[in-house]
Amino acid sequence: MTKDYYNILEIQKNASNEEIKKAYKKLAIKYHPDKNKGNKIAEEKFKEINEAYEVLSSPDKKRNYDSLGSTNFNVNSNNFEREFSSARFSDFEDLDFFSRIFSVSSRKKTTDREITLNISLYDAYMGSKKIIIINNKKIEIIIPKGTLETTKIKINNKGPINPISGIKGNLIVKFNISSYKNFKLNGKTLETEIEVYPWEIALGCEKLFETIEGKKIKLKIPPDAKNGEILNLKGLGMPIIGNSSKRDLKVTLIVKIPKIINNEVKTIYERLKEIYS
């Protein structure tokens, strides 16, 4: 038996497109699964509303329905239900929402869950494993070397079950990366600072420097460098995920002024004052 789509949307047969859309929006909000959890009658009504709107909002389908008294094609109301069950009620205020929602390619069958995991910069740099507990179940998170705050990891079938489709979603993991020792992450760039004395920055020198991995290297400081100057150390920055190479490390020079600890130091300062006055 052919369904009366006009009756389902509570409109007259001569209703305009705007009236059809308005009626649909009103009923879709009323019978939306989020407002009627566990209500099977509302669930079926919601399917009918979506099915009716798909036909009556399409000039060709509506013409076929009006002339033949049948749609003469298959209307997949289950897809509608899945899509609309994930829509916010505020979406119904957006007129473009209706055109977007009926794009078959954009219909989702799963519901993903997104979480943010706090990790140290050392773990992000070196790579690590973390165990988290969701719904009393342990989930192992593999943190790749070179993880950034823009990195997202998808763990299949560890998200919530879509209440309509019954399909298990995915767990999407983002990262909040805290500083480690004297190192911090700025976007994709690993940064740190090193203290130098005035004579070291004026005359140039080599200073022993410890990388984030704990390796000791010699850092060459050029003569006449300036306070706040940034040295670029190639290949000592963040690893690139899926690649054996690394980005550069930025090292900022911070001049440390020695305290006057005895008369000899005081005399040196006084002599410098005379020279530069």
Image (tube, helix red, strand yellow):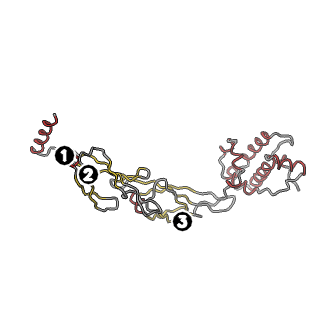
Is disc 3 placed on a helix, strand or loop? strand
Please give the name of the residue rendered at 84% of the width and 46% of the height, measured from the top-left corner: 6
Q: Tell me where residue 168 sits by quadrant.
A: bottom right
Q: How far apart are marks 2 and 1 (CA)?
A: 19 Å
Query: For this rendering, which residue is in front, 137 or 129?
Result: 129
Q: Which of 268 and 172 is in front in this view?
A: 268
Which numbered disc flags the more N-terminal residue, 3 or 2?
3
* Residue denoted by label 1: 258
> Are the residues at dot 3 and dot 1 in contact (C-beta closer than 8 Å)?
no
Q: Position of residue 3 (x, y in %)?
A: 85, 52
Task: Tell me the number on the disc at residue 137.
Answer: 3
29 relative position to 243: left or right: right
Question: What is the three-letter code of the residue carrying label 2?
Answer: Ile
Out of 13 and 103, give the one closest to the viewer: 103
Of labels 2 and 1, earlier in sequence is 2
> Please, what is the three-letter code of the amino acid marked with disc 1?
Pro
- Is residue 277 positioned above or below 31 on the image? above
How would you rate the neighbour count of disc 3 (Cα within 10 Å): few for under 14, some for 14-19, many for 20 or more? few
Q: Nearer the viewer, mark 3 or mark 2?
A: 2
Q: Residue 134 carries which label?
A: none
Find residue 161 and report its image quarter. bottom right
